[in-house]
Amino acid sequence: MKDTTADGVALTVSGDAHPRGYLEEKGFWSWVYTLDHKRIGLLYLYTTLFFFLLGGIFALLIRIKLLYPGQQIFSDHMYNVLFTLHGSVMIFLFIIPAIPSGLGNFFIPLLIGARDVAFPRINLASYWVFVAGILVILASLVRPMDTGWTFYTPYSAKTAADVTLLSFGIFLVGMSSILTGLNFLVTIHKLRAPGMTWHRFPLFIWGMYATSIIQVVATPVVGITFLLLAMERLFGVGFFDPAKGGDPVLFQHFFWFYSHPVVYVMILPAMGIISEVIPVFSRKPIFGYRAIAYSSLAIAFIGFLVWGHHMFVSGMSKTANIIFSFLTFFVAVPTAIKVFNWIATMYKGSITFESPMLYALTFIFLFTFGGLTGMFLGALATNVHAHDTYFVVAHFHYTMMGGTMMGLLAGLHYWWPKMTGRMLSEKLARAGWLLTFIGFNVTFLTQFFLGYGGMPRRWAEYPAQFQPLNIVSTAGSWILAAGILIMFVNFIRGLYTGEPAPASPWKGLTLEWQVPSPPPTENFEEIPHITNWPYGYTKRKTDGYE
């Protein structure tokens, strides 16, 4: 045994170079029944990354269909099915659960000095409820959905597709999200190590705390919405059918009241990852710790108030439109605070450009670009012109894929040595990053011009005048796919043949870097006592923290 101290963090770790790790127990059933938060996090990651690849295949097929007008590789109806599957798989089975349930499960206890989450059995149950939801969704493919991932009524209430079964599957996935959020909230409040005050939290914890609040508060709304839709289809209750006294726009209000806050379920954890990566690879304390921390809560709160900007052309009153437009611009303020502080952290820092930092910088660039283009959609006059065009598609992918996915990739490259005990190849990581960055921008920057020119989204056919830019966008998707393929090759290679990882390859100061790689089953031999904040990369005090 030996005591180590990293900038005021008193911690006891094993003196054995190869302590018993959480991966040592072998066998299928050891994973099925595991209560270890790290293994459950990996189960979520493996599952969501599989569906990321599947959703990506759907996207490539869609781009091939749009390579030129009149493309008959598959029918227009099959295009609608693939479009729906791409959106549903990416949103519900990848982007929403990947960081919160995957990396969140793995690292929240480690970052706050706990041995596990508050309710390990509920944690395991949440994963298998998630899997049950996936199986139900897959069963609905016997009569696949063709409504688009938003499932708008009145079409979704009348289509021959198995909407009821799909609704139940999404209901189960939502239940899993609620259980995870509750577990994290209790864990953060009750299990943090002695001395781990709120202002000594790693910023990833602040992001996950705000995320968990949204999961608990917003997710029941979408569950109720799909329950109402199923009741209308099964029993003829007129919630959304005007012929029965219902209102199809009511479905949009319910759906977006959930779906806009859930955007921040996707993006806030990614912002938390960036807040961890930037100071480590800048070798500087994070600038404006409290501003970044509280801006996460501000984003979560304001996110509940802006759903109406998805519905400016749906017939809402002018007053409601103006209010939602103002709030849409207002939510940019706490986001801009984060971006400013990340850049200020890097100012005069000793920056190194390992793969986690490359993805973090990519996140800042792409997400900022996506956020700025969102201002065009938040303004009433320009929204009317750009609504339901490829401008929206490009904006959405710059914020979600350029934001959430790049944040996830920054986190995977940053924490891979800790999760697996092995290093990734930096050469392959940089090659994958470069192709991903180029391919992403070629694919989606082009779509801003398509949308500004008036090309509608969701259409299987388009006027011939848009063909040249569609060819460029499709070619970009192939470059993007090549980058992602290289990245996954690197992950698989690193998992089996990567160099053994030291406890702290990046010289980070947060608690997870103070234990061996991979972590022992119980995380810590003795619960650490925290005496300082986790970003003390210089001896001077920063922001008045003690």
Image: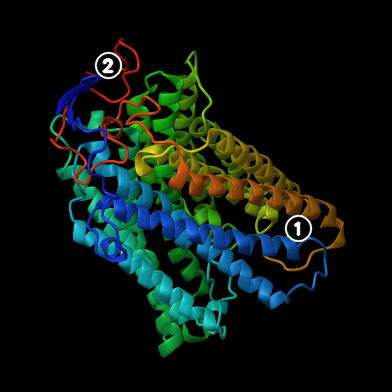
Left or right: 522 as drawn, with respect to 47:
left
Q: CA distance from mark 1 to mark 2?
A: 52 Å
Q: Residue at x 27, y 41 (%)?
A: 519
Q: Which residue is mark 1?
A: 455
Classify mark 1: helix, strand or loop: loop
Q: Which residue is mark 2?
A: 544
In the image, farthest residue toward the bottom: 235
Up the image or down, 304 lies above or below 195; here it is below
- The circle drawn on residue 508 is none
| Residue 521 can be seen, yes or no | yes
Quarter of the image containing the N terminus?
top left
Q: Position of residue 166 (x, y in %)?
A: 46, 76
Q: Position of residue 357 (x, y in %)?
A: 50, 30
Q: Residue at x 64, y 51 (%)?
A: 481
Q: Position of residue 398 (x, y in %)?
A: 59, 45
Amino acid of disc 1: Met
Classify mark 2: helix, strand or loop: loop
| Front-lying residue, 536 or 309 | 536
